[in-house]
Amino acid sequence: MKKILIIDDEVNVALLLSKFLTRNGFDVQTASNGNAGMELLKNGEFNLVLCDFRLEDTDGREMLKNIKMQYPKTGVIIITGYSDIKMAVELIKMGAYDYITKPLYPDEILNTINKAIETQYALSEDMRDDIEPAITHSKSKENKKVVQNGEFVFGTSRASKEILRQIDLVAPTNYSVIIIGDSGTGKEAVAKSIHLSSPRHNHPFVAMDCGSLTKELAASEFFGHEKGSFTGALYTKIGHFEMANGGTLFLDEVGNLSYDIQAALLRTVQERKVKRIGSTKEIDLDVRLIVATNENLQEAIQKGRFREDLYHRFNEFSIYMPPLRDRGNDIMLLAEHFLVIANQELSRNVTSFSPEVVECFMSYRWPGNIRELKNIVRCATLLTEGNEIMMKALPLEISNRMMAFDYGSNGSSASSSPVETPESKENRHDLKNAALEAEYETILNVLKEVNFNKTKAAEILNIDRKTLYNKMKAINLK
């Protein structure tokens, strides 16, 4: 049970908030002033502190400073009856998760609390250790899994180890990083891991989806605006650069930005200053940039869709995220991890996958990558009545795709090509079948080159031995 400390000198507010959070499953304690709150923190470990800004013996700024200095793993949300944007920015820079103004709305504060605890959960090594036994049996430091917000696991495959090595190298620096990979491969999780492993980990991590921005909204989202600066600007808005000051700004699908916004972005990155729309005041920036893309930005440069100078500003270090199908044994590690999460979400007790499901997962190409795997495991957990996920709980498209080109059904051997039946002749221009046939030929040719030494073949094919065995089994190469 998550523990929350409420520090507020308004007894009625503290009492109502305490009852509300207790009903929602939290262990809550209250204190009426700063000194009493610090004493409670000294005597027990809390996940989160809700602290009123104006206290009889101190203020929220001092409380935040003391809590972050003495208990850095504890999240802090400041509550006040006074709305002040400048103060909010200052408190977030000091390490507060958020700043909420009264009156307090139940749904809003519960949502903010859950997000704050989730963020602190990712930051806390102790909390990571609590959940690791559920996702790994390995005790070696080298093979230790890293979980980001319950969404992503770095495994033991060669690809995963290389990603971890690169994160360890670049995290302590201030280099800008480009993360390249297909949709669903975990690019944001890697960005969070870099941030959490960096000296900026106590400062904000702000993520921005560039793919969802219209040309009209992009400037306001990046740089913010002053009240009345344009039609519809009913209030002052803090941009993402300013929100991330001192920390990390993650720009996802950066290749979707318009050319005009790229020019404005380049100026901000070069000068390390930002100016809100409608303001004459420049704000100094100390922001680390991490960007992600699922397209080839160098091709976009050649086609005139992306600025080369901005690309080189971003590309001080690059990390490639391989597709899930190239991560070998990580597939089942991830599946088991998502099974743990699904059991918690659905209050189920599904313990394993059937051998047929394991074989299916290892043979499937996962076009949606980790995101697709997570969704399939969640759905299968919901549909499973017993303790083991069976093939019937999987979506039809998985088994259909896996069987799209069933090698070996005609008794073909490793030394001969698959028999072309009338049905296969009819479908030979099907791209799925063509891809499977090409994979068959590639594996067979490599095996012949190395005299059927499977270790060498796996190295040449850039997969591990188990993945090779599973692929050979799927296409009946014996």
Image (cartoon, rainbow, N blue to C red):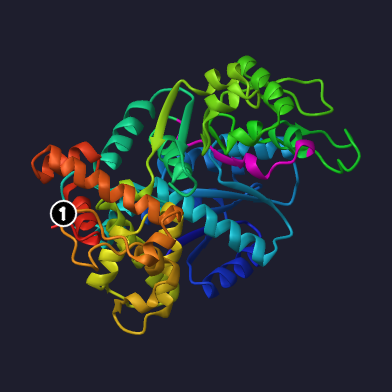
At a point 30% along the width and 63% down the height, the residue shown is 336
Tell me if mark 1 has few (under 14), some (14-19) or many (20+) residues whose alpha carbon lies within 10 angstroms of its own: some
Q: Is residue 150 visible?
A: no
Left or right: 140, with 93 as reference point: left
Frontmost residue, 389 versus 37: 389
At a point 24% along the width and 61% down the height, the residue shown is 474
Left or right: 367, with 466 as reference point: right
Left or right: 276, with 395 as reference point: right
Q: Position of residue 242 (x, y in %)?
A: 65, 31
At a point 53% along the width and 48% down the height, the residue shown is 76
Q: Where is residue 211 in the image (x, y as percent from the top left)?
A: 64, 42
Left or right: 294, with 392 as reference point: right
Q: Can residue 135 be seen in this view?
A: yes
Identify residue for label 1: 414
Q: Position of residue 165 (x, y in %)?
A: 29, 32
Frontmost residue, 94 versus 391: 391
Q: Is mark 1 on a helix, strand or loop?
A: loop
Frontmost residue, 68 versus 421: 421
Q: In which quarter of the image is the N terminus?
A: bottom left
The magenta segment is 200-216
Queried whether the magenta region covers residue 206, the answer comes back as yes
Queried whether the magenta region covers residue 103, the answer comes back as no
The vertical placement of 313 against 49, above or below, is: above
- Tell me the amino acid under the disc marked 1: Ala
Q: Where is residue 355 in the image (x, y as percent from the top left)?
A: 22, 70
**Dividing the picture into quarters, in which one does residue 389 lie?**
bottom left
